[in-house]
Image (cartoon, rainbow, N blue to C red):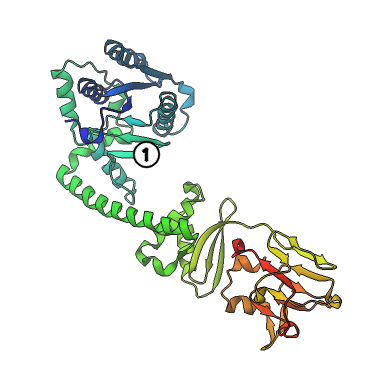
Amino acid sequence: MLNESLLDKKKRYLVGVSGGVDSMALLDMLVKKGYQVRVVHYNYHLRNDSDLDEKLVFSYCQKHQIPFYVKQGCIDEYQGNFEKIAREKRYAFYHEIGIQEGINEVILGHHLNDYLENIIMQIKQNKTKGYLGIQEVSYVQEMTILRPLLKVKKEELYRYCQENQVEYHEDYTNYDTSYLRNYIRHIDLKNYDEKELLAYAKKHNESYLKKQEYLKQMMEVYKQQHFLNLNQIKQDDLEDVLYEMLKKEIYPPYISQSLIQEIKKQTQSTKPNIEITLPVNFVFTKVYNNIAVRKKESDDTYSIKYKSFYKDQQKYFLLSDTGHIHDGVYLQKEDFPITIRSFQNGDKIITSGGTKKVSRLFIDQKIPKEDRKVWPIVENSQGEIILIPHIAKNIKYLYTKPNVFVIKYDTCK
């Protein structure tokens, strides 16, 4: 009955026990099979008989010499969606005790009926994009959640408790069909064919898990190179990839479907550079075929004047007397003071091929838009642009051996 392939008798586990038939059957199975457990119980004080649950669980733990931890809740804490709030508080308590005990694995008593109810609820609420049902192994608040009874029907747990004389306490609110889950449990579930529901979920979940593995690989590439090339992404998977990229930086509730659709639409644009403002000070960028989500940059314009040469280190460049020939120019006394500044609209430089717009040179060299803003531009005392490191030199300085080098940091590329 218990899926022991998920468990290890050498490990210690927390077990979430409410006092109901599911969790009491689970606890008794674990104890009789010799697993090392500590019991955690959350008393919500929502019902007038909730203390009976606590006493029942405590009595079992006392009898079997099992460490018992309880958290006393307060009815005033549950304003809003009770199930959501209760779950958050319950898992926070598990995490707290887990840290205290040095345990990060929690065993819960979810069973096959819970699994089927979840599938129906997801279908009814049109939430079928993710995994359907409940997973045997999942992760919450840095804890591993294990559900070794997920293939066991609830009636089998009733039978187990009766045969093994395990006491449990029924929660009468589980029969209140004004709650959606209870309505599904007691009324709706009868309208579904169990085998068809399981087959549908199995097929869906196999496809979902395959997709998750693909997305995991894509995010590993993104982590390594800090961008993804659109040619690497299957068109059918683009929305999912975009969501994963956004999720790394933005709280998921802020990521609307309309935002993803807008970004997807912009990725199909022929414009070489696109920037879309995102929530919480982030931007989505498309530079030619490369896409990324980045922190929104502050104003990084700069202008530094040098009356004479000296070695200097600034945020975006290094002024040196050695370097690559394409980063240097030969300067004489009359060239000073020189100015090293960030790009400005309208900048032009006279090259061997004629007068060129700096913006066009950036485009021809496929320089990312965020780099163009901070790329060093070097002017002489006459205000002429004489050097754009590694991109272009003024024709007057083209055939002399450089003695001054302006090196743009690689970290800006």
**The C terminus sits in image quarter:** bottom right
| Point 65% across, 73% down: residue | 324
Which element type, helix, strand or loop, lies under badge 1? Answer: strand
Q: Quadrant of residue 221?
A: bottom left
Q: Is residue 264 above or below residue 215?
A: below
Q: Locate residue 260, reporting x and y percent.
A: 46, 59
Q: Is residue 162 above or below residue 3?
A: above
Q: Locate residue 254, reporting x and y percent.
A: 50, 49
Circle 1 packing at 10 Å, graded few (<14), some (14-19), many (20+), is few
Q: Is residue 248 above or below residue 85?
A: below
| Point 86% across, 77% down: residue | 334
**The N terminus sits in image quarter:** top left
Q: Quadrant of residue 174?
A: top left
Q: Quadrant of residue 398?
A: bottom right
Q: Is residue 196 visible?
A: yes
Q: Which residue is mark 1?
A: 139
| Point 67% across, 70% down: residue | 323
* 104 vs 269, nearest the viewer: 104
* 11 vs 322, nearest the viewer: 322
User: 382 left or right of 175?
Assistant: right
Label count reads 1
Q: Locate residue 89, reporting x and y percent.
A: 44, 29
